[in-house]
Image (cartoon, grey):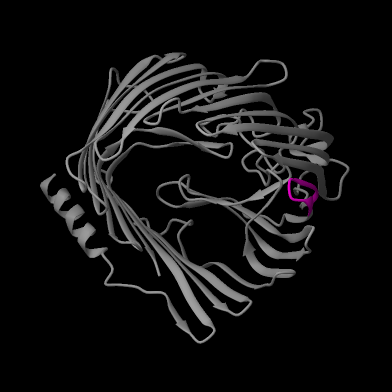
Amino acid sequence: MKAFLVRAIVLLVVTIPLGAACFEIGDITVSGSNRVEYWLWQEAEEEVFDDRFDIDIFYKNFLFGFRYQVVEPSNVSLYERREGFYRRYIEYDSRRFGIRAGNYYVTFGRGLLLRAYEDDLAYLDRDIDGVKIRGSTDWGDITLVTGRPRNTEFHQLAYAVINDTTDIIRGADLSLHPLPFFSAGASYVLLVAEKEQFDTSAVFFKRTEVYGTNVSLNIANVDIYGEIAKKWGWDPNLADPQIPFNSGGIGQGYGIYGSASLSFPGYGITVQFADYDSLGLGEEMYRYNSPPILNRYGQSINKGIDETGYQIEAYLSPIEPVNMSLSYSDLKTADDTLFFKESFAEVSYQKSGLLELRAAFDRTEQHGVITGAADWKEAIPKFDGIFYLTQTHSLGVGYQRRLVSGTMEFRDDRLYLSYAFAPYVTVTLTGELRDKELLEEPGNEWRSVHVDWDITQDHKVTLLVGTEKRTFTCSGGVCRYEPSFDGIKAVLISRF
């Protein structure tokens, strides 16, 4: 263990950059970022190195950019290893017109029709490789897109390209804002996918269309948004078991989403409603659209195939040092066989420069949503506080208990202690204990040391040494299990 800690300290030191700076040469401006990530598993003696180097070069109205990525697991024969240009693009952008060729991200409306994005926290990357064109006037904007979509996820030892197919997406998005407080839009997306080799259905290729409209109203303290989408064409979820090798069929679907917010100084409430039926665009393992998820976890029931529900969130600050947050969400299928419910409440007290206290309670109830657990109930009370010793030195403490019942029953207790030297370094010690050992995850104790070091405004190092339990993570309706970890995780993020 001593040698292991020495390796962690050496790793933290050698990842410190000598320096970086954004520079200009006449009309040319160069900026970029680099993210180095290194994972080392102690017992398995496996490791993976990931480096993402991004450069943007601006010249007047032009942008040239690329990402060079290196993913090198210790298993050198792993087919998901990569070294090369993962992303490249060229763009012209002015007030009235813009065009981008190469990799890009785009969202139509709130994502009911199309959403291509990157989520660093969930290690999820959905980009499109093609062309995006924009035209603008004083009262409206239009965006045209075409290209090949891709879904990529990081699964600890390597990046998994969930789909890297011949699929083509074409789309158009019109947004009109004739009045300062009112806007309306319309969108259209066409997905063309290749027919599988042994598919015996009477189609030559898979063609799916989604179109919709949205309106937005913003008056004083009120925000109202509504969107409707309609889907028609090939749906992989309509497979007929009577036809051999038939992987889908022709069908229809729809999506309805609405939100309304009312806010005043110290008070606010937001209500969201959604009804999705066969709206998922793409195969079962991935999606090209991502309609809003109505819970704090980002967890959907079946990614827009059959979901309806609502969420209510409220914020209150009755007196200056006290803040309260409340949330309730209810998501289910049309026949009530699958459902997800969440209740959340939080109270915080903040006295500037002296202390911060927070108490929260989170309860979820699921049925048929988590694989392998038909009924799953979770209750999580937690408390944490920060005590300021001086303007730059502070101590933190937190405790959380997780009570799980239903198909599985167990209890997790988590305690952490932290020290911060603002704004440079934060060191956190975490210990977690489970009252029993589960079949899915050997062991019932986890301990770790976490260091956040802001070297400069543009360079940050994070280091974790120790063990982490198996976790269930979600983002944008995409959920997966992250296996338990025992070793070192080090990340260096630099901007220049």
Seen in the picture, residue 211 relative to 10 is either above or below; the reply is above
- Residue at image position (18%, 59%) is 10
Seen in the picture, residue 283 relative to 150 is either above or below; the reply is above
Outermost residue on the right side: it is 202
Outermost residue on the bottom side: it is 26
| Residue 240: quarter of image | top right
| Residue 232: quarter of image | top right
Q: Which residue occupies the foreground of this view, 169 or 387? A: 387
Q: Position of residue 44 (x, y in %)?
A: 28, 45
Q: Position of residue 30 (x, y in %)?
A: 48, 76
- Residue at image position (45%, 59%) is 81
Q: Can see residue 84?
A: no
437 left or right, relative to 210: left
Q: Where is residue 155 in the image (x, y as percent from the top left)?
A: 45, 46
Seen in the picture, residue 421 relative to 331 is either above or below; the reply is below
- Magenta span includes 457: no
Question: Main SS of the magenta segment?
Answer: strand
| Residue 379: quarter of image | top left
Give the magenta-colored segment's residue range. 174-189
Tally of numbered tags: 0
Q: Which residue occupies the foreground of this view, 448 or 268? A: 268
- Residue at image position (68%, 42%) is 283
Q: Can see residue 219?
A: yes
Quarter that holds the C terminus: bottom left
Quarter that holds the N terminus: top left
139 left or right, relative to 416: right
Q: Where is residue 311 in the image (x, y as percent from the top left)?
A: 61, 25
